[in-house]
Amino acid sequence: MKKKFFKKSNFLNIFVTILAALYAVPMYTAVVNAFKSYKDMTLSPFTPPTKIYLDNFIEVMNKINLFVIYRNSLLITSVSVVLVVILSAMAAYPLARYTTRLNKFVSKFFIVGLMIPSGLSIISLIKLLMILKISGTYLGLFLTYAGSAWICLVIFMYVGFIKTVPKQLDESAYIDGAGYFRTFWQIIFPVLKPCTGSAIIIASMGIWNDFLTPFILLGGGDNAKTITLAIYNFAGKYTSRFNLIFTVMLLSATPIIILFILMQKQFIKGLTSGSVKG
């Protein structure tokens, strides 16, 4: 048994190492070439830069309005993530606490939401937003993300975590005279902090890196560009200047990397705590 266990663990370690390398190599290539001149990049694309070359960042900032792009992306991501977290937590609480037939059906309904690609509903979504007269607006984009597959994923994260929270907390709150919503917001939701941290990171990464939804709903105008649309437009204009493209990619990933560094403890704790009941 021990030999089989060690064989399986060795296989998993090798598999994880290969998978990590597949993710690390493109990231390494983008970072090192963002600090190289075009000549140095073409001569040695995989070696570390012998001299830090910051002209790429200066040239990128002169060609695109980073302030407007960051402002748009931060606004869209922050508001959408807040909506996703609040709505997901409120929906997950009754699903985790009350095992009725209706709740089981609703849970399966959210599973279907995870399985259906978002691109299939884009035409009907645009028609609905046009009927509501919010097509091409930030409000339409916020509501789109609030009803996207991200909310289905975050709901299941919250459901798994809430099941580990003792029901005695709810009962004690009811005895003290707290209502349903007060119990949730003042007693249960603060306990969900680790899961909330994980949900914020996962939803932020997905919404920040989303290209199709803002491209279709906002149109990609200069005042409505997000960071992914900026990369798309920049790469189309400077297809041969890969050092500049790598620089834009590095600038686009920096806010999410900072967010993960600041919340990595909550992220890891949230993923592990909800996986074990008791």
Image (cartoon, rainbow, N blue to C red):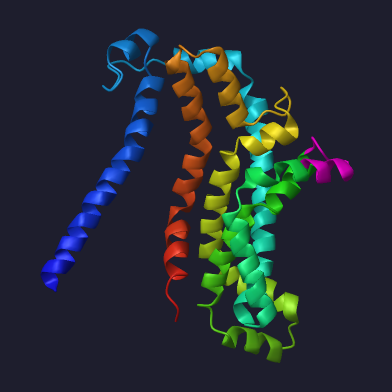
Number of numbered discs = 0
Which residue is more in the foreground, 1 or 260? 1
Asked if residue 15 shows in the view, the reply is yes
Q: Residue at x 63, y 47 (%)?
A: 118
| Quadrant assignment, res 89 | bottom right
* Residue 216 placement (x, y as % from top left): 71, 33
* Residue 251 placement (x, y as % from top left): 50, 28
Which residue is more in the foreground, 68 or 109? 109
In this picture, residue 81 sits left or right of residue 179: left
108 over 254 or under it: above or below: below
Q: Residue at x 15, y 61 (%)?
A: 7
| Quadrant assignment, res 154 | bottom right
86 over 71 or under it: above or below: below
Q: Quadrant of the N terminus?
A: bottom left
Residue 130 highlighted magenta (yes or no): yes
Q: Quadrant of the C terminus?
A: bottom left
| Quadrant assignment, res 112 | bottom right
Q: Residue at x 66, y 83 (%)?
A: 100
Q: From which residue to which does the magenta span run?
A: 126-137
* Residue 274 placement (x, y as % from top left): 47, 70
Task: Tell which residue pokes out farthest to the top in this image.
Answer: 39
Q: Residue at x 64, y 26 (%)?
A: 67
203 over 103 or under it: above or below: above
Residue 123 highlighted magenta (yes or no): no
